Amino acid sequence: VKASNSLSFSLQAKMSRPVQARRLEGIDKNIWVDFVKLAATYSKVNLGQGFPDFPAPEFLTEALTRALSGGNHMLHQYTRAFGHPPLVKVLAQFFEKLLGRDLDPMTNVMVTVGAYQALFCCFQALVDEGDEVIIIEPFFDCYEPMVKMAGGTPVFVPLRPNPPKDGRLMSSADWQLDPAELASKFSERTKAIVLNSPNNPLGKVFSRGELGLIAELCVKHDVLCISDEVYEWLVYDGKQHIRIASLQGMWDRTVIVGSAGKTFSATGWKVGWVVGPDRLLQHLRTVHQNSVYHCATIAQEAVAQGFQRELMLYGKPESYFVQLPKELQQKRDWLVQTLDGVGMKPIVPEGTYFLVADISQFKSDVPDVPNSDEPYDYRFAKWMVKNKGLAAIPLSAFYSEAHKNNYTNFIRFCFAKEEATLKAANDILQKWKQEKTS
Ligand code: PMP
């Protein structure tokens, strides 16, 4: 009896120590885990998470079918760790065109498991204990925990809204950085800034002037730029996506992050990439070879063929990169009209497939709970999916803890959806508005 007692004591003692690594502290919550589950359980119309519900282009799915059963059985085996050669080659050719500089496919490009792993490699490879990383709010939520996991400290700077005075709808361009405030965030501790243009969630497309300001500060303070450009082709109203790496002094300090999921409407394939100078990418390769090592060959082969097609059709009307934004712009306009019509004021996005809308006029339906830990927009989005069957994402999820409570009157919709899905959303909102007024 004595022996078994002491055994159970020692087992208990072992189990009482924390099992998780310290770097995981405080980063266990994830908005997508919660809201994807809610949408799966309750939604009739899901405009929450960012993925298209229309098919990926046929040329891409046909390329995958060919890769799968086209006779080259080696496509079922490992390929090069840092990217399947046909894919890195065509990405280098493509980005040479976009950036106007020569690129080496083996050292200036690396393929990753979606842009998500590309970001993870950036932070792990470039951020040290004690480094500060500037993040522009609102931001794609994973930047903050990824910086922290690397031992860095996120420093936030907000895009500040300037509501238009002339009665027109607000645009994502009305959200701007305050130059003095941005400059004040740079110090000798700053290692990098994360730029996301076009920006998720607002859809803001940074102008040449805004990018010039960021570039100037990066050069002045010798700071790196992690440039998340996954929505690079989704730009509307004749606006141009400008690559910060093409500005003076920026190539050597910028890593461009991209995503085939967003580019070819195939988010489930999880093929992403980084493009940048070897002096930075060599360290990303170290992280990659010691974590994921290598990405699915067959998906890379099909994406390579998709890019080969796009390279041939570059700028032509048949190009997917020309057609997709045209179609999405119509969907955006449709959702803008619906939301404006019911009084859920939209902020018209210049890019991406997201749209942020003001829920102030609908607040009376969803009672606030004073002193609750949960931001109001979380409560609203949860109520909306449970009671109306319409899923969206609260905007404050894209803010740091300290600033969340300043932005609880907005929700984000994804409009990369079939016409029928957008119509169904319209029906829900119209009915809701009628119930409110009758
Ligand atoms: N960056 C941004 C800004 C995103 O919105 C997303 C996906 N929602 C990603 C990166 C991740 O992309 P992927 O699906 O290719 O991993």
Image (cartoon, rainbow, N blue to C red):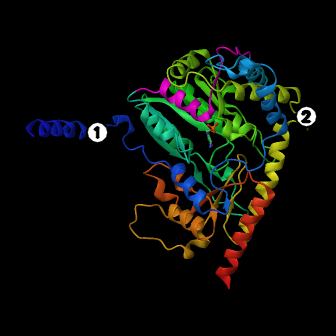
Q: Residues within 10 Å of mark 1 (few under 14, many from 20)?
A: few
Q: Is residue 356 above or below residue 187?
A: below
Task: Return the residue nearer the eye: 418 or 151.
Answer: 418
Whether residue 273 sits left or right of residue 377 in the image: it is right
Q: Callout 2: helix, strand or loop?
A: loop
Extent of the magenta region:
102-128
Q: Earlier in the sequence, mark 2 or mark 1?
A: 1
Ligand 1: image quarter: top right
Q: Which mark is residue 325?
A: none
The residue at the far bottom in this view is 438
- Residue 107 in magenta stretch: yes
Report the residue marked by disc 2. 316
Residue type at tag 1: Pro
Task: Return the residue nearer the eye: 66 or 406.
Answer: 66
Residue type at tag 2: Lys
- Note whether residue 382 is visible: yes
The residue at the far right in this view is 317
Q: Is residue 361 above or below residue 400?
A: below
Q: Callout 1: helix, strand or loop?
A: loop
Residue 356, x across and y down, in percent: 64, 57
- Residue 320 in magenta stretch: no
Residue 434, x across and y down, in percent: 70, 79
Residue 398, x across and y down, in percent: 54, 49
- Note whether residue 98 is visible: no
Whether residue 195 sits left or right of residue 335 in the image: it is left
Report the residue marked by disc 1. 18
Residue visible at 56% across and 75% down in the picture: 365
